[in-house]
Amino acid sequence: MIVTAECECHPTEEKEKVCQAMHNIFPEGEITGDEHLTLVCESGEKLRNLIWDTQIRDSARSVLLRGRTDDSIHFTLNKQAAFMGKISFQDEHSALGNISVVIRDDNIDEVIDYLAESTIKEEDE
């Protein structure tokens, strides 16, 4: 799994705080850039833990499935929530901007199951 997260650092924001928001979700990532920040890492473990700890697996799974392509997932996180160490998926633009995330993997369905396994039990036939 390769995770790329990007966001803008606006003139009214402190770069360190924007970097902290990104690292709160992807602590293993290395961040480059000044005004346009890009984080790259190979783990979604913290994202998974936040999804599971806040018990939003089914809603997160829905977001991930909506953003799924053949080999990637695209979704957006609220930057302010990320700064607080929380997950808030965004459908629209927020005033201070969002964190745009792309996760690539050869088996993207396994990644979705890893990040947000469904809590709905399938009945035995």
Image: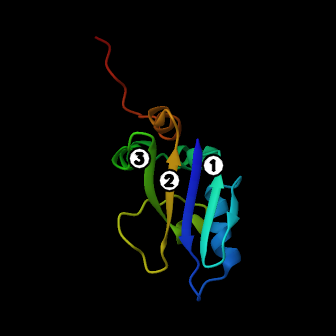
Give whichever of 125, 63 is nearer the camera. Answer: 63
- How far apart marks 1 and 3 lie (CA) works out to 16 Å
Amino acid type of the residue tagged 3 in the rendering: Leu
Q: Which mark is residue 102?
A: 2
Within the image, what quadrant is residue 69 found in? Answer: top left
Q: N-terminal of the two: label 1 or label 3?
A: 1
Query: In which quadrant of the rendered image does the N terminus lie?
Result: top right
Q: Which residue is mark 1?
A: 46
Residue 59 spot, x, y in % from top left:
38, 48
Classify 118 as above or below 63. above
Q: Secondary structure at mark 3?
A: helix
Look at 63% across and 48% down and name the residue there.
Answer: 46
- How far apart marks 3 and 2 lie (CA) works out to 10 Å
Say which of marks 1 and 3 sits in front: 3
Question: Does the residue at mark 3 contact the one at mark 2 (Cβ under 8 Å)?
Answer: no
Instruction: Name the residue at the bottom extreme.
Output: 12
